[in-house]
Amino acid sequence: MPRGGKRPNAGRKPRVSAPGAAGFDSTAPKTVTHLNRGGRKPGVPNKATTEAKEFAAAILGDPRYVKKLRARAFAGKLHPSVETMLWYYRSGKPKERVEHSGRVSLIDLLVGPAESAEAPV
């Protein structure tokens, strides 16, 4: 017997959650033995995300940085990924479409189509 002389589940209803189980009542609420009350509350942003947004806002809010950024952009010296991101913000990111034109066997992918003719099926 555990410390304190009590049985571990004394006074608790057994957890019943599956239809067909003994004592199952579909209208009764499910019995939960443990409620997780830890962690962030819903809607509270991650601390790292908040700090990153504040850092970005401080940099982009600095007129000296914005002036240098514009100068690099007009001189064509922006990194391609930054320029691409600016275009996405300006015009929206285009939807990527993948077209499937037929069936490809796993053997074709692994050894190539020419060698798959020789492979047994």
Image (cartoon, rainbow, N blue to C red):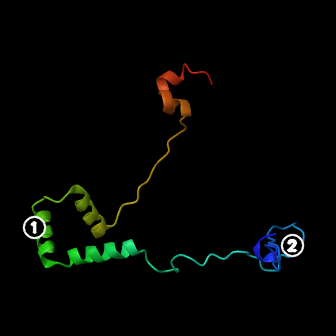
x and y percentages locating residue 104 in the rendered image: 53, 36
Report helix, strand or loop for mark 1. helix
Q: Tell me the kind of residue under disc 2.
A: Phe
Seen at 81% across and 71% down, the residue is 16
Which residue is at 47% across, 23% downward? Answer: 114
Residue type highlighted by circle 1: Ala
The residue lying toward the viewer, choosing from 100 and 71, is 71
- Residue 24 locus on image (x, y percent): 86, 73
For the N terminus, the image quarter is bottom right
Which quarter of the rendered picture does the C terminus lie within? top right
Q: Residue furthest top?
A: 118
Question: In the displayed structure, would residue 25 be above or below residue 103?
Answer: below
Q: Nearer the viewer, residue 108 or 97?
A: 108
Q: Compared to 107, does 34 lie above or below?
A: below
**Is 119 positioned to the left or the right of 72 in the image?**
right
Q: Of marks 2 and 1, which one's residue comes earlier in the chain?
A: 2
Pick the residue in front: 7 or 99: 7
- Disc 2: which residue: 24
Identity of the residue drawn at 40% across and 59% down: 95
Q: Residues within 10 Å of mark 2 (few under 14, many from 20)?
A: some
Count of numbered circles on the image: 2
- Residue 31's x, y, as percent? 77, 77
> Would you identify the image quadrant in which residue 48 lies?
bottom left
In terms of secondary structure, where does tag 2 sit? loop
Calculate the distance from the C-alpha at mark 2 to the C-alpha at mark 1: 71 Å
Residue of label 1: 71
